[in-house]
Image (spheres, rainbow, N blue to C red):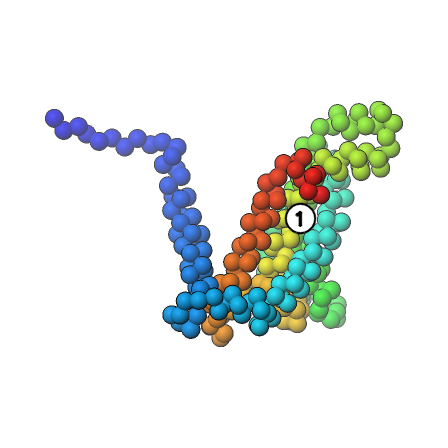
Amino acid sequence: MNKKLKFRFSRKALAYPYMAFLILFVVVPLVMILINAFITDGNKIGFDNFVEFFSDAGGGLTVLGNSLIIGFVTTLLCLVIGYPVAYFLAKYHASNNVLVLMFILPMWVNFLIRTLSTKTIFLAMDLELGMGTVLFGMVYNYLPYMILPLHTTLVSIDKRLIEASEDLGASKGTVLVKTIFPLSLPGVVSGITMTFIPAISTFAISEILSVSKIYLFGDAINMHFSKATNSFGVGSVMSLVMLVLVIVSNLFTSLNEEEVRSVL
């Protein structure tokens, strides 16, 4: 007797479309980049692309160094500005839903539109486009990515710990430095990662707000993958370097609170 096969819908079946999406749009492109990194002169396999990048023949390491410096400054500015803002939002958490929404709303607008609008404002103010305008644009675009993780962490801090510190005679400054800030370190690390990695890999912001005067790592990758240069191999190597930085940052973000304190 033939038994009828019945399809049983399970939770595992919901993961299949997601797995197919990851394989098609994440795994396959990464494999193609890895293969292209070892291909030179059309069909020759070797390490010429790696030698060209790490020997700084095309200025790749110099661009990476400049990008790391600008990314560090951008992240530092976002932290200096974002921490007090996140602290204020967390302190008045019960009545600040509108304020939080004001910081989220700009993220709903495409960053290219925001950057072009910023450029228009600078031109209307007759300001010279350069390093200052690039840093302003990067801080403006990435500041919400610093504020939101900090706000989430600060809100989740047990208020009884703060009250206990105050009951023991600690001043507001001491409570902030020795109680609140250490407890918010996971949010600080998460905000730094979410800001630093996009900052060093960006290309549109620096290109638009400096009129192509400032050349960052993302600009170099975009140039190598353009039809004009047709140097996919070196661009693939630079993409792999960027991937390594992302993996390292994610490993750092995954550390728990005690591990974060030991590293810092």
Instruction: Residue 154 in the image: state x and y as whole percent.
Output: 70, 36
User: Looking at the image, which residue is at 57% across and 72% down?
Assistant: 58
User: Looking at the image, which residue is at 40% across and 39% down?
Assistant: 15
User: Looking at the image, which residue is at 75% across and 38% down?
Assistant: 181
Is 83 above or below relative to 226? Answer: above
Frontmost residue, 84 versus 125: 84
Quarter of the image containing the C terminus?
top right
Using residue 118 as the reference point, say whether residue 171 is left or right of it. Answer: right
Instruction: Residue 183 in the image: state x and y as whole percent.
Output: 72, 35
Is 43 above or below relative to 171? Answer: below
**Residue 34 occupies which quadrant of the picture?**
bottom left
Using residue 26 as the reference point, say whether residue 107 is left or right of it. Answer: right
Element at label 1:
helix
Instruction: Residue 243 in the image: state x and y as whole percent.
Output: 53, 54
Frontmost residue, 251 versus 113: 251
Is there any visible trace of residue 107 in the rendered image?
yes
**Residue 162 occupies which quadrant of the picture?**
top right
The residue singled out by tag 1 in the image is 192
The residue most toward the left is 1
Is 202 above or below relative to 55? Answer: above
**Residue 137 occupies which quadrant of the picture?**
bottom right
